[in-house]
Image (cartoon, rainbow, N blue to C red):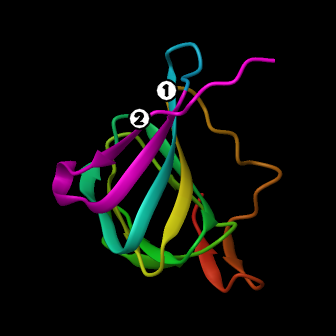
Amino acid sequence: MRLFTMPSRPIERFDSSGVVVDLLPGLLGESQITVAHVAAGGTIGAHPTAHRQLLAVVSGVGQVRGEDGTVQGIGPGSLVLWDTGESHQTWATTDLVAVVVEAVGVIDLARRFPEGLDDHANVVHQA
């Protein structure tokens, strides 16, 4: 077994505020995985994705916006997928923790991940 420390850094690009990310190792240089900590009232500012991007909410409540401008609520268990080049933004209503995966390849959501409203979380999932 080997133990490592995840490096952390604040994110201020794109007018982001209240955001700190923990960096995880990439996969074959084709993906980037981070853990985003967004303080209540903070935002990951509007910007286009460099690759397909998946936001998986671990804790907290917030909102996301995609290319079409629609704002949707998110909470624990929400998965949000943005396509390459899609402009998007995330806001935290409460302190929010999410795993962010940026991938060049396919993100397979076909079978195990239902798209749409989750009655238990009362939030909308996008895929």
The residue depicted at 59 percent of the width and 20 percent of the height is 27
Q: Decide: few, some or many residues near mark 2? Use Cα within 10 Å; few <14, some 14-19, many ≥20.
A: some
Q: Is residue 60 left or right of residue 64?
A: right
Depicted 119 relative to depicted 42: above or below: below
> Which quadrant of the view contains residue 9?
top left
Whether residue 8 appears in magenta in the rendering, the answer is yes
The residue depicted at 32 percent of the width and 42 percent of the height is 85
- Which numbered marker is on residue 8? none
Amino acid type of the residue tagged 2 in the rendering: His
Q: Of residues 88 and 96, which is closer to you in this image?
A: 96
What percent of the width, then of the height, locates residue 30? 50, 19
Depicted 59 relative to depicted 101: above or below: below
Q: Which residue is mark 1?
A: 104
The image quadrant where one finds the N terminus is top right
What percent of the width, then of the height, locates residue 76? 66, 70
Residues at circles 2 and 1 in contact by the CB criterion of under 8 Å: yes
Depicted 78 relative to depicted 123: above or below: above
Q: Of residues 26 and 49, which is closer to you in this image?
A: 26
Q: How many marks?
A: 2
Q: Which residues are magenta?
A: 1-24
The residue depicted at 62 percent of the width and 25 percent of the height is 4
Furthest-top residue in view?
Answer: 28
Q: Which residue is mark 2?
A: 51
The residue depicted at 41 percent of the width and 35 percent of the height is 51
Amino acid type of the residue tagged 1 in the rendering: Val
Distance (Cα) linking label 2 and label 1: 6 Å
What percent of the width, then of the height, locates residue 49? 34, 43
Q: Is residue 36 left or right of residue 121?
A: left
